[in-house]
Amino acid sequence: MAETMFPPGDKEGPWEAGEAQRLKRYLGVCDVDTIARIFGRTSACVENHLESLDENQVERPWSQEELSDLKRLHGTRTNRDIARVFRRPVESVTAKAAELCLAKDKAFVRKIADRNATPTRMPRWSAAEIELLKELYAQNSNLDIAQNLQRSVKSVVSKAHSLGLRKDHSRLVEMGIKNVSLRYDRKDSEGAESMPSDMGN
Protein backbone atom coordinates (compact mmCIF):
# COMPACT_ATOMS: atom_id res chain seq x y z
CA MET A 1 0.00 0.00 0.00
CA ALA A 2 2.75 2.47 0.97
CA GLU A 3 4.54 1.72 -2.30
CA THR A 4 1.57 2.97 -4.32
CA MET A 5 0.65 5.91 -2.05
CA PHE A 6 4.12 7.33 -1.37
CA PRO A 7 6.96 7.69 -3.89
CA PRO A 8 10.47 6.72 -2.78
CA GLY A 9 12.03 9.50 -0.73
CA ASP A 10 15.57 10.81 -0.50
CA LYS A 11 15.28 13.25 2.42
CA GLU A 12 18.21 13.21 4.83
CA GLY A 13 19.28 15.32 7.78
CA PRO A 14 17.89 16.07 11.25
CA TRP A 15 14.33 15.08 12.11
CA GLU A 16 11.94 17.93 12.81
CA ALA A 17 9.88 17.89 15.99
CA GLY A 18 6.68 17.22 14.06
CA GLU A 19 8.27 14.27 12.27
CA ALA A 20 9.54 12.78 15.52
CA GLN A 21 6.06 13.03 17.03
CA ARG A 22 4.39 11.44 13.98
CA LEU A 23 6.95 8.64 13.96
CA LYS A 24 5.51 7.35 17.26
CA ARG A 25 2.33 6.35 15.43
CA TYR A 26 4.22 4.04 13.08
CA LEU A 27 6.90 2.47 15.30
CA GLY A 28 6.14 -1.21 15.66
CA VAL A 29 3.24 -0.98 13.21
CA CYS A 30 5.15 -0.49 9.94
CA ASP A 31 8.52 -1.78 8.83
CA VAL A 32 11.44 0.56 8.19
CA ASP A 33 10.94 0.71 4.41
CA THR A 34 7.28 1.68 4.83
CA ILE A 35 8.10 4.35 7.39
CA ALA A 36 10.76 5.71 5.03
CA ARG A 37 8.22 6.09 2.23
CA ILE A 38 5.65 7.74 4.50
CA PHE A 39 8.21 10.35 5.62
CA GLY A 40 9.87 10.75 2.24
CA ARG A 41 13.21 9.66 3.70
CA THR A 42 15.67 6.92 2.90
CA SER A 43 15.53 3.66 4.82
CA ALA A 44 19.07 4.30 6.06
CA CYS A 45 17.97 7.65 7.46
CA VAL A 46 15.12 5.98 9.38
CA GLU A 47 17.45 3.27 10.68
CA ASN A 48 19.92 5.89 11.91
CA HIS A 49 17.14 7.80 13.68
CA LEU A 50 15.88 4.64 15.40
CA GLU A 51 19.43 3.91 16.57
CA SER A 52 19.60 7.42 18.04
CA LEU A 53 16.37 6.72 19.94
CA ASP A 54 17.97 3.60 21.39
CA GLU A 55 21.05 5.57 22.46
CA ASN A 56 19.23 8.53 24.03
CA GLN A 57 17.03 6.81 26.58
CA VAL A 58 16.45 8.38 29.98
CA GLU A 59 15.06 6.88 33.19
CA ARG A 60 12.58 9.28 34.83
CA PRO A 61 9.22 9.26 36.63
CA TRP A 62 6.25 8.26 34.47
CA SER A 63 3.72 11.00 33.76
CA GLN A 64 -0.01 10.29 33.76
CA GLU A 65 -0.12 10.86 30.00
CA GLU A 66 2.69 8.35 29.46
CA LEU A 67 0.91 5.75 31.61
CA SER A 68 -2.25 6.27 29.57
CA ASP A 69 -0.31 5.83 26.33
CA LEU A 70 1.52 2.78 27.71
CA LYS A 71 -1.81 1.06 28.46
CA ARG A 72 -3.01 1.88 24.94
CA LEU A 73 0.14 0.73 23.14
CA HIS A 74 1.37 -2.19 25.19
CA GLY A 75 -0.87 -4.91 23.76
CA THR A 76 0.17 -4.37 20.14
CA ARG A 77 3.79 -3.16 20.27
CA THR A 78 7.03 -4.80 21.36
CA ASN A 79 8.60 -3.40 24.51
CA ARG A 80 11.58 -2.27 22.46
CA ASP A 81 9.38 -0.16 20.17
CA ILE A 82 7.51 1.22 23.17
CA ALA A 83 10.83 2.13 24.76
CA ARG A 84 11.68 4.08 21.60
CA VAL A 85 8.33 5.88 21.72
CA PHE A 86 8.95 7.04 25.28
CA ARG A 87 12.76 7.26 24.98
CA ARG A 88 13.10 5.02 28.02
CA PRO A 89 15.13 1.88 28.73
CA VAL A 90 13.34 -1.34 27.76
CA GLU A 91 13.71 -2.49 31.37
CA SER A 92 11.70 0.53 32.52
CA VAL A 93 8.87 -0.30 30.11
CA THR A 94 8.90 -3.98 31.10
CA ALA A 95 8.83 -3.18 34.82
CA LYS A 96 6.00 -0.63 34.54
CA ALA A 97 3.93 -2.98 32.36
CA ALA A 98 4.36 -5.73 34.95
CA GLU A 99 3.37 -3.32 37.73
CA LEU A 100 0.20 -2.42 35.81
CA CYS A 101 -0.47 -6.10 34.98
CA LEU A 102 -0.49 -5.41 31.24
CA ALA A 103 -0.32 -8.25 28.71
CA LYS A 104 0.28 -8.52 24.98
CA ASP A 105 -2.76 -9.19 22.79
CA LYS A 106 -2.92 -12.81 21.66
CA ALA A 107 -3.29 -11.80 18.01
CA PHE A 108 -0.18 -9.62 18.29
CA VAL A 109 1.81 -12.45 19.87
CA ARG A 110 0.81 -14.75 17.00
CA LYS A 111 1.77 -12.06 14.50
CA ILE A 112 5.31 -11.75 15.82
CA ALA A 113 5.76 -15.46 16.57
CA ASP A 114 8.18 -15.72 13.65
CA ARG A 115 10.44 -13.31 15.54
CA ASN A 116 10.78 -15.75 18.42
CA ALA A 117 8.12 -14.06 20.53
CA THR A 118 7.02 -16.19 23.44
CA PRO A 119 3.44 -15.67 24.61
CA THR A 120 2.77 -15.31 28.30
CA ARG A 121 0.29 -18.06 28.98
CA MET A 122 -2.03 -17.56 31.92
CA PRO A 123 -2.86 -20.75 33.86
CA ARG A 124 -6.45 -21.94 33.93
CA TRP A 125 -8.64 -20.26 36.52
CA SER A 126 -9.12 -22.39 39.62
CA ALA A 127 -12.44 -22.55 41.44
CA ALA A 128 -10.90 -20.59 44.34
CA GLU A 129 -9.65 -17.84 41.99
CA ILE A 130 -13.06 -17.54 40.37
CA GLU A 131 -14.73 -17.20 43.76
CA LEU A 132 -12.22 -14.52 44.77
CA LEU A 133 -12.81 -12.69 41.48
CA LYS A 134 -16.57 -12.72 42.13
CA GLU A 135 -15.96 -11.40 45.64
CA LEU A 136 -13.61 -8.59 44.59
CA TYR A 137 -14.85 -7.49 41.19
CA ALA A 138 -17.78 -5.25 42.09
CA GLN A 139 -15.93 -2.92 44.46
CA ASN A 140 -12.24 -3.08 43.43
CA SER A 141 -10.18 -1.82 40.51
CA ASN A 142 -9.18 -4.35 37.87
CA LEU A 143 -5.53 -3.50 38.51
CA ASP A 144 -5.84 -4.32 42.23
CA ILE A 145 -7.60 -7.58 41.40
CA ALA A 146 -4.97 -8.49 38.79
CA GLN A 147 -2.16 -7.89 41.27
CA ASN A 148 -4.01 -9.91 43.93
CA LEU A 149 -4.48 -12.86 41.57
CA GLN A 150 -1.11 -12.39 39.82
CA ARG A 151 -2.80 -12.15 36.43
CA SER A 152 -2.98 -9.52 33.70
CA VAL A 153 -5.70 -6.89 33.69
CA LYS A 154 -6.87 -8.26 30.35
CA SER A 155 -7.26 -11.71 31.89
CA VAL A 156 -9.31 -10.30 34.76
CA VAL A 157 -11.56 -8.28 32.45
CA SER A 158 -12.06 -11.23 30.09
CA LYS A 159 -12.96 -13.67 32.86
CA ALA A 160 -15.28 -11.16 34.56
CA HIS A 161 -17.05 -10.58 31.25
CA SER A 162 -17.47 -14.33 30.66
CA LEU A 163 -18.96 -14.67 34.16
CA GLY A 164 -21.31 -11.74 33.63
CA LEU A 165 -19.81 -9.75 36.52
CA ARG A 166 -20.48 -6.02 36.84
CA LYS A 167 -19.04 -3.15 38.84
CA ASP A 168 -21.26 -1.70 41.57
CA HIS A 169 -22.80 1.69 40.85
CA SER A 170 -20.66 3.30 43.57
CA ARG A 171 -17.52 1.93 41.90
CA LEU A 172 -18.59 3.25 38.49
CA VAL A 173 -19.18 6.70 40.01
CA GLU A 174 -15.72 6.60 41.61
CA MET A 175 -14.16 5.63 38.27
CA GLY A 176 -15.97 8.49 36.53
CA ILE A 177 -14.78 11.03 39.08
CA LYS A 178 -11.22 9.74 38.75
CA ASN A 179 -11.31 9.94 34.95
CA VAL A 180 -12.69 13.48 34.98
CA SER A 181 -10.06 14.54 37.50
CA LEU A 182 -7.25 13.04 35.41
CA ARG A 183 -8.64 14.60 32.27
CA TYR A 184 -8.73 18.12 33.66
CA ASP A 185 -5.39 17.75 35.40
CA ARG A 186 -3.90 16.93 31.99
CA LYS A 187 -5.70 19.80 30.29
CA ASP A 188 -4.45 22.25 32.90
CA SER A 189 -0.83 21.08 32.67
CA GLU A 190 -0.47 20.17 28.99
CA GLY A 191 -3.56 21.31 27.14
CA ALA A 192 -4.52 17.69 26.39
CA GLU A 193 -8.07 17.15 25.17
CA SER A 194 -8.40 13.38 25.12
CA MET A 195 -9.70 11.17 27.94
CA PRO A 196 -6.94 8.96 29.35
CA SER A 197 -7.26 5.22 29.07
CA ASP A 198 -8.58 3.59 32.25
CA MET A 199 -7.60 -0.04 31.80
CA GLY A 200 -6.63 -0.24 35.45
CA ASN A 201 -10.17 0.32 36.69
Image: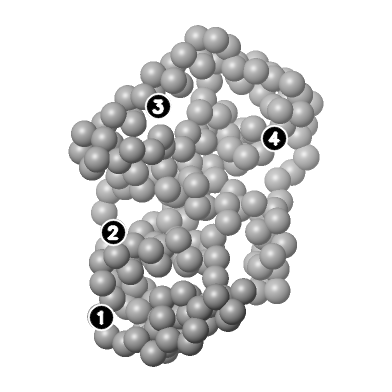
Residue at image mark 4: 158
Name the front one of labels 3 and 2: 3
Whether pointer 2 and pointer 1 mark residues with C-beta atoms closer than 8 Å, the reply is no
- Indicate the secondary structure of the residue bearing disc 3: helix
Residue found farthest to the top: 170
Amino acid type assigned to the residue bearing label 4 in the image: Ser
The first of marks 4 and 2 along the sequence is: 2
The first of marks 3 and 4 along the sequence is: 4
Decide if residue 130 is on the left or right side of residue 58.
Answer: right
Name the front one of labels 3 and 1: 1
Residue 14 is marked as 1
Write down the quadrant of residue 151 in the picture: top right
Name the front one of labels 4 and 2: 4
The first of marks 4 and 1 along the sequence is: 1
- Indicate the secondary structure of the residue bearing disc 4: helix
Residue 179 is marked as 3
